[in-house]
């Protein structure tokens, strides 16, 4: 008896919610579904004469926002998780008419576009009916989930597109890194070594004629050699830090935290070594995030938390959280630093999440799938 009363109360509460939510959902979604369906058909019909190239993309972006809101309602009201099926938007896009054409082609090639359009008639009819009748509201959420969730083919297609993008990012990152190394060598250590060679030639000519001046040039050559050695060490640290190769990711991150201009509280709990590419990616990602906090966030303190999360016996991930007490307002689109970190992690199926309200604090979370070696 005691169990039946709470269960009856819960059912009554759910029915009362359905009595309010269902009709409201039906009244709001019916005109929106009809409008978006008509606009989609008209835009498709206008494609051959070129007008649809301009009208189709905004209509589909509006439809995707509408579909995403329905996915959220299915999760919030029905407890059904409905992932987004859309392919990633291409980052490289032309301007003007070329940009419109590229965007239109990208939308037309995405199977999720046609799935959204085909969902609208079902939402106008069966969706409207099940929403209007409160006891049938769960069927509405199930219909939304069934027609808007990604199919296996769509997931595979999106994965292929993501891998294609990350492959290009890896090639671009490698080329940019090689150019940076070449520039640093040319402008730094190489120039100092050339100057040192010229000084040694002058010393050889002056060693008997003017020993005092030769001695001064020797001291200058010694300083140049020390500066060249320092620059070479910095260059090597930028390619692959020695401490990372010798002592692993935890000690390398602690050393990185100690070198920062502002205090960094590091809490690092990792079980051991990981594959070298993963350690390198995590190290340079953390380095970029800490540098951003020191240079741009005007922070007085940073907290670095690193741990290994074992999701299943065969899978786990290195999770990093960097929090600062700065001014906030950071964005992935504001500069190339965090976007570069995101591309670097994507090569390992890693992700970056940013939470930075206007007044701070800023929290950057990184996660890279990995297994201890």
Image (cartoon, helix red, strand yellow):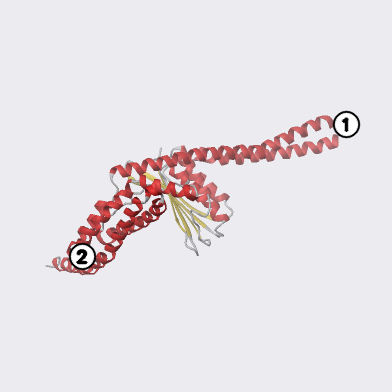
Distance of mark 1 from mark 2, alpha carbons? 105 Å
Q: Position of residue 291 (x, y in %)?
A: 55, 51
Residue drawn at the location 49% of the way across and 41% of the way down = 280
Please state if 212 lies on the left or on the right of 338 as rendered: right
Label tally: 2
Image location (x, y in percent) of residue 159: 36, 42
Q: Which mark identifies residue 351?
A: none
In the rendered view of the protein, which quadrant contains the N terminus? bottom left
Q: Nearer the viewer, residue 237 or 258?
A: 237
Q: Secondary structure at mark 2?
A: helix
Depth order, front residue of 358/193 = 358
Q: Which mark is residue 132?
A: 2
* Mark 1 or 2: the one toward you: 2
Indicate which disc, 1 or 2, sits on the residue closer to the N terminus: 2
* Crowd class of label 1 (few under 14; some 14 to 19; many from 20; radius 10 Å): few
The answer to whether residue 125 shows anywhere in this view is yes
Query: Which residue is the site of mark 1?
Result: 209
Image x and y of residue 182, in percent: 61, 37
Q: Is residue 289 left or right of residue 186?
A: left
Q: Is residue 221 above or below residue 75?
A: above
Residue 150 appears left or right of 58: left
Query: Residue 3, percent across and down?
Result: 15, 65
Quadrant housing residue 194 = top right
């Amino acid at each position: 008896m005691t169990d039946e009363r709470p269960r009856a109360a819960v059912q009554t509460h759910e029915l009362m919610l359905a009595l309010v939510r269902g009709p409201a959902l039906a009244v709001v979604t019916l005109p929106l579904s009809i409008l978006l369906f008509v606009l989609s058909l008209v835009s498709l019909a206008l494609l051959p004469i070129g007008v649809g190239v301009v009208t189709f993309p905004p209509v589909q972006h509006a439809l995707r926002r509408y579909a995403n809101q329905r996915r959220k309602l299915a999760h919030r009201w029905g407890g059904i998780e409905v992932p987004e099926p859309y392919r990633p938007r291409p980052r490289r896009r032309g301007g003007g008419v070329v940009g419109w054409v590229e965007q239109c082609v990208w939308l037309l090639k995405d199977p999720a576009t046609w799935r959204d359009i085909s969902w609208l008639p079902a939402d106008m009819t069966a969706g409207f009916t099940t929403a209007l009748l409160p006891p049938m509201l769960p069927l509405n959420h199930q219909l939304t989930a069934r027609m808007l969730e990604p199919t296996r083919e769509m997931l595979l297609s999106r994965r292929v597109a993501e891998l294609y993008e990350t492959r290009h990012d890896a090639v671009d990152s490698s080329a940019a890194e090689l150019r940076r190394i070449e520039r640093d060598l040319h402008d730094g250590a190489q120039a100092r070594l050339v100057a040192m060679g010229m000084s040694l030639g002058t010393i050889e000519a002056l060693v008997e004629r003017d020993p005092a001046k030769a001695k001064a040039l020797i001291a200058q050559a010694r300083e140049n050699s020390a500066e060249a050695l320092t620059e070479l060490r910095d260059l090597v640290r930028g390619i692959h830090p020695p401490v990372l190769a010798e002592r692993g990711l935890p000690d390398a991150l602690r050393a990185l935290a100690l070198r920062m201009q502002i205090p960094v509280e590091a809490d690092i709990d990792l079980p051991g070594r990981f594959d070298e590419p993963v350690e390198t990616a995590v190290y340079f990602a953390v380095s970029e995030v800490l540098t951003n906090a020191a240079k741009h966030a005007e922070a007085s303190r940073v907290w670095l938390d690193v741990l290994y999360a074992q999701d299943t016996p065969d899978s786990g991930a290195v999770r990093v959280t960097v929090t600062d007490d700065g001014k906030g307002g950071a964005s992935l689109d504001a500069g190339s630093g965090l976007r570069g970190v995101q591309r670097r992690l994507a090569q390992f199926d890693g992700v970056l999440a940013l939470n930075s309200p206007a007044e701070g604090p800023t929290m950057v979370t990184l996660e890279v799938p990995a297994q201890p070696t």
